[in-house]
Each structure stands twice: as structure tokens, then as C-alpha cells.
Image (cartoon, helix red, strand yellow):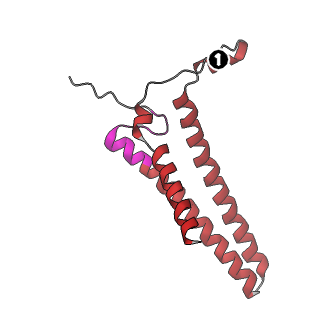
């Protein structure tokens, strides 16, 4: 069991390092070759970075909404518990988990803002400054 756990952890770490590789972010920007017409003409301008940045924004918003919903459900459970120790304990655990989740989402957003302020790399828009010597 320990070997399986070790293999799974190393696979997850390897995958995380591969996905966070800065060389992939600095690679040439491929354009998706769509030629839609009518009101969909802007879809022809889709790039890999715009899709990834849109996905990151969507994940942050969905996670924040999910944890907020969990917080509201935990509050309702606490109100409905009416003195039952087990029910109020479950509600307290749900509220604690929701607050921790919200904190993680906002800390992730703050780290992204800090990276943008310090290094000029906007992860949410994937705009990377030029490193050409002047």
C-alpha cells in the first residue's frame, strides 16, 4: 500500500511540474484555425493562452461560488440543528471547510496578483513581457 501511495504521489508531482513548466508559457503562441462567420467572427482569434486564461478565471469563479454555497448550506444546517449535537457538529465542520476553501481561493487570487505586480506576468490574461535587451 505504501508503494502505491508513493507512486501516486510522484505521478501527481510530476504532472504538476509538467503543467507548471514556464517554458510552455513562453512558447510561440499557436492560433486555432477557425474561420467562423456572422456573429462568431471573433472565434477565429482564439489562441491557446486565451482558452487557458479563460479556464483559469472560470475555475476561480466556480470554486468561490461553490465554497460560498457550502457556507450558506452549513449555516442553514446549523439553524435547523436545533440543539442536536451531531447535526450542529456537522454544520460546524461544513462551515469551517467552506471558510478554508474560500480562503484558499482568495489566497490563490492574491498570489496571482502578486506575481503580476512583482514580475509583470499576468497569469489571468497570460501576457508575458518581452525580455529583449535594450
In this image, 34 relative to 103: left or right? Answer: right
Please identify the quadrant where the N terminus is shown.
bottom right
Residue 16 in picture, x, y percent from top left: 49, 50
Q: Residue at x 52, y 65 (%)?
A: 6
Q: Which residue is mark 1?
A: 34
> How far across and how far down the image is residue 88, in percent?
71, 81
Q: Residues within 10 Å of mark 1 (few under 14, many from 20)?
A: few
Q: Nearer the viewer, residue 73 or 13?
A: 13
In magenta, the rendered stretch is 112-126
- Quadrant the C terminus occupies: top left
In the image, residue 97 sits, relative to residue 40, either above or below, namely below
> Which residue is more in the foreground, 33 or 77?
33
User: In which quadrant of the rendered view does residue 41 lie?
Assistant: top right
Q: Residue at x 65, y 53 (%)?
A: 65
Q: Is-magenta flag for residue 103?
A: no
123 is within the stretch colored magenta: yes
**Relative to residue 76, is residue 112 depicted above or below?**
above
Front-most of 124 and 132?
A: 132
Amino acid at each position: 500500500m505504501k508503494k502505491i501511495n508513493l507512486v501516486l504521489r510522484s505521478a501527481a508531482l510530476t504532472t504538476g511540474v509538467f503543467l507548471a513548466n514556464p517554458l510552455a508559457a513562453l512558447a510561440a503562441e499557436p492560433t486555432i484555425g477557425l474561420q467562423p462567420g456572422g456573429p462568431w467572427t471573433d472565434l477565429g482569434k482564439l489562441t491557446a493562452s486565451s482558452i487557458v486564461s479563460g479556464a483559469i478565471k472560470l475555475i476561480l469563479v466556480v470554486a468561490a461560488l461553490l465554497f460560498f454555497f457550502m457556507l450558506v448550506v452549513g449555516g442553514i444546517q446549523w439553524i435547523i440543528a436545533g440543539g442536536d449535537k451531531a447535526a450542529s457538529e456537522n454544520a460546524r465542520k461544513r462551515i469551517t471547510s467552506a471558510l478554508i476553501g474560500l480562503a484558499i481561493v482568495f489566497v490563490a487570487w492574491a498570489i496571482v496578483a502578486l506575481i503580476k505586480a512583482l514580475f509583470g506576468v499576468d497569469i489571468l490574461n497570460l501576457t508575458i513581457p518581452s525580455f529583449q535587451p535594450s
